Amino acid sequence: MSKNRVLSKFGGSSMADAIAIRRSAALAKKQGSVVVVVSATHGTTNQIIALIDLALKSSWEEAEKHYQEIKIKHLHIIEDMKSSQEMKTTVLSLLQEMETIAKGVNLLKDCSLKAMDTVLSLGERISSAFMTDAMNEVGTKAVYFDIRKVLKTNDQFGQALPNIQDTKTAADMHMKSLLENGNVLVTQGFIGATEEGLTTTLGRGGSDYSAALIAEAIDADVIEIWTDVAGVATTDPRICENAKPIDEITYQEAAELATFGAKVLHPTTLWPAMRKNIPVFVGSSINSEERGTWIQKTTKENPLVRALAIRENQILLTLTTPRMLNTHGFLFQVFKVFNDHKLSVDLVTTSEISVSITINSPSILSKSLVRDLGEIAEVRLDENLSLISLVGSQISATPGLAKKVFSALEDINIRMICLGASSSNICFLVDTKEGREAVKRLHAQFI
């Protein structure tokens, strides 16, 4: 396979309307993209979720009003793009499928995760039809490609896990010859299929991840993620007006930022790129001349603190029991409860008789989880917390760092701190009402 193989992924904001789609198509041509991966048009995934929710809970008349809004939005794009008859037929057929599934959900008052994945896939399948037309309009040899032929997953509907080897094998079978014949393949993010061909999704935000998986499978040389912001910043500019653009960042640092709250990338995106050492570029499709951010294995400069992230609405669970003292197996019991509930944890600290654990959202905290944990220890819940992370180089090996952090936050109470598990970050919890002020102070101190 040839070198300089560029895969470009365009998010929902880059697919908002006919103007945005044409602009993205022109950018993909300029970049020499051989595979173009797209999200659903802006807001469509949320609209489909709302449609199914209405179909479950309301009359068909109420649900149909919402369906018509989705349909009209896409009919406007068809009209504005002066689309080919083939594309019109494809989009109208997909919209009809959406209506049929929603009617079925309304009739049965039931929607399985399997059915939900099928209806959610329609957003990407429609937008990729638009993008195929736009790519042909700017003079490329574009082909609409159904990624479900290639991106193979398990049957965990709603949050499917990819099968890396099967995906590579399918890419060689279905994509290799098309690429070698000079075609530009326009395809979908977010979706895949089981071995039996059933449609799956990779979870919210999974478009970036699926783009990286496809890049890995076709041995791409570069992954481009085009969004509505010009790369990664030193922190959220909405919180700190002095946030600066970052020219380059390591895979490890970017993964830490994404995991701990930065919105530019989905946390899983970087693992396929890391496995194949594929550089990732993040840029703005609206202002493509801006520098953007390169994410790669090594960088020229390695500052102590590269960036800060904040994740709000965190919960701290503290489990206390004398049985922890000088005994083994307690943490095994705790993590078994989380495993049984299919929940992951973030930060963990322990003392002689207590263990404190953070989880990401109140929405995943169930009464049954608290009950099961209560059978092995006394449980205390602290809510309305923010998790702040400093991400950079050799953080755990740098003397005096903690002193600078605590000095900057001397009148802000720190509820929990984690340092040492990664050389790239230090994390701590503060009350939500003080979280953004803490970010501003730390940004001023270190950046």
Image: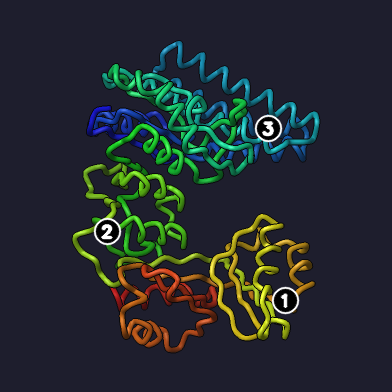
Toward which corner of the image does residue 28 lie, by quadrant? top left
Q: Residue at x 27, y 51 (%)?
A: 294
At label 2, which amino acid type do we have? Ile
- Give the quadrant of residue 136: top left
Secondary structure found at label 2: loop
Residue pictured at 44% horizontal, 20% vertical: 79
Name the side, left or right, on which 199 lies relative to 241.
Answer: right
Colouring used for the render: rainbow
Which badge, 2 or 3, is on the more N-terminal residue? 3
Q: Position of residue 66 (x, y in %)?
A: 64, 34
Can you say which quadrant of the picture contains the N terminus?
A: top left
**Residue type highlighted by circle 3:** Ala
Which mark is drawn over residue 379? 1
Q: How dense is the environment of label 1, judged by Cα within 10 Å: few (below 14), some, or many (20 and up)?
A: some
Q: Is residue 176 above or below residue 271?
A: above
State the residue in front, 358 or 170. Answer: 170
Few, some or many residues within 10 Å of mark 3 (<14, 14–19, 20+): some
Residue that sits furthest to the top in the current view: 85
- What is the distance, in whole Å, between disc 2 and disc 3 at their CAs? 41 Å
Please identify the quadrant where the C terminus is shown.
bottom left
Residue contact between numbered discs 3 and 1, judged by CB atoms under 8 Å: no
Q: Position of residue 222 (x, y in %)?
A: 28, 40
Q: Which mark is residue 246?
A: 2
**In this figure, which residue is indicated by the disc labeled 3?**
115
Let me know if residue 91 appears in the view. yes
